[in-house]
């Protein structure tokens, strides 16, 4: 099965890096294919009861700076592979951002790592990858 528009969801985790390798392989075996990489991040939220507590701007800046660094790292890796990929940094709920990007850009397949950087909420299959698999209207390759 060959895909012409490959969407990689990337967060810098170990599984995400393995997904990157698979996406590169897919792009290389399909002449004329395009690889789109999305790093979706969201600012942390801290709830006290039902109220949303504001976080210091420095915390949000650290999250943003890490997201930019992650995006730059994946750009460098793709350039080293000789691939002309489109890399985007998007803010929002990761599963939602990935699914919207896939729909808006006509992706043929989504490549995603099985577990990301989400922490304790992710047990067997990460919550983001689980949501993407459940909601996607196109094939999803989950890489372990």
Image (cartoon, rainbow, N blue to C red):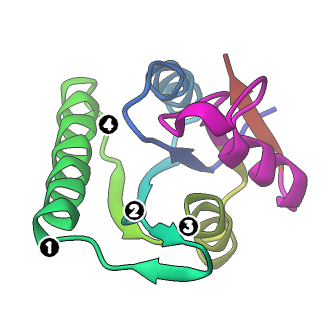
Which numbered disc, 1 or 3, marks the residue that appears first in the sequence? 1
Residue bearing the label numbered 4? 83
Give the quadrant of the N terminus. Answer: top right
User: Image point 83% across, 55% down: which residue?
Assistant: 138
Q: Is mark 4 on a helix, strand or loop?
A: loop
Provide the residue designation for mark 1: 57
- Residue 33 appears in the picture as rendered: no
Mark 1 or 3, closer to the camera: 1
Q: What element carries label 2?
A: loop
Which sits earlier in the primary sequence, circle 1 or circle 4?
Answer: 1
Question: From mark 1 to mark 4, how far is it between C-alphas?
Answer: 36 Å
Tag of residue 44: 2
The stretch of residues the image draws in magenta is 111-138
Residue nearer the viewer, 130 or 83: 130
Mark 4 nearby-residue class (10 Å; few <14, some 14–19, many ≥20): some
Q: Earlier in the sequence, mark 1 or mark 2?
A: 2
Q: Earlier in the sequence, mark 3 or mark 2?
A: 2
- Element class at badge 3: loop
Task: Give the Cα distance between marks 3 and 2.
Answer: 11 Å
The residue carrying pointer 2 sits among few (fewer than 14), some (14 to 19) or many (20 or more) residues within 10 Å by Cα, namely few
Residue 81 horizontal side relative to residue 127, left or right: left
Asked if labels 3 and 1 touch by Cβ distance under 8 angstroms, the answer is no
Which badge, 2 or 4, is on the more N-terminal residue?
Answer: 2
Q: Is residue 34 magenta?
A: no
Sequence order check: which comes first, mark 4 or mark 3? Answer: 4
The span from disc 1 to disc 3 (Cα, nearest Å) is 19 Å
Residue at 39%, 68% (x, y): give it: 90
Task: Determine contact: label 1, label 4, CB under 8 Å.
Answer: no
In the image, farthest residue toward the front: 49
Quadrant of residue 140 in the image? Answer: top right
Query: Disc 2 or disc 4, which is closer to the eye?
Result: 2
Question: In this figure, which residue is indicated by the disc labeled 3?
Answer: 93
């Amino acid at each position: 099965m060959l895909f012409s528009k490959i969407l990689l969801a990337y967060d810098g985790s170990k599984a995400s890096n393995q997904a990157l390798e698979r996406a590169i392989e897919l792009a290389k075996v399909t002449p004329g294919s395009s690889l789109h990489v999305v790093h979706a991040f969201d600012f942390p939220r801290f709830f006290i009861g039902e109220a949303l507590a504001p976080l210091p701007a420095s915390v949000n800046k650290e999250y943003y700076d890490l997201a930019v660094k992650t995006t730059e790292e994946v750009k460098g890796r793709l350039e080293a592979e000789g691939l002309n990929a489109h890399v985007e940094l998007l803010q929002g709920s990761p599963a939602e951002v990935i699914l919207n990007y896939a729909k808006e850009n006509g992706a043929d397949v989504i490549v995603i790592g099985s577990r990301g950087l989400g922490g304790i909420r992710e047990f067997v299959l990460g919550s983001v990858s689980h949501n993407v698999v459940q909601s996607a209207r196109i094939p999803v390759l989950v890489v372990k």
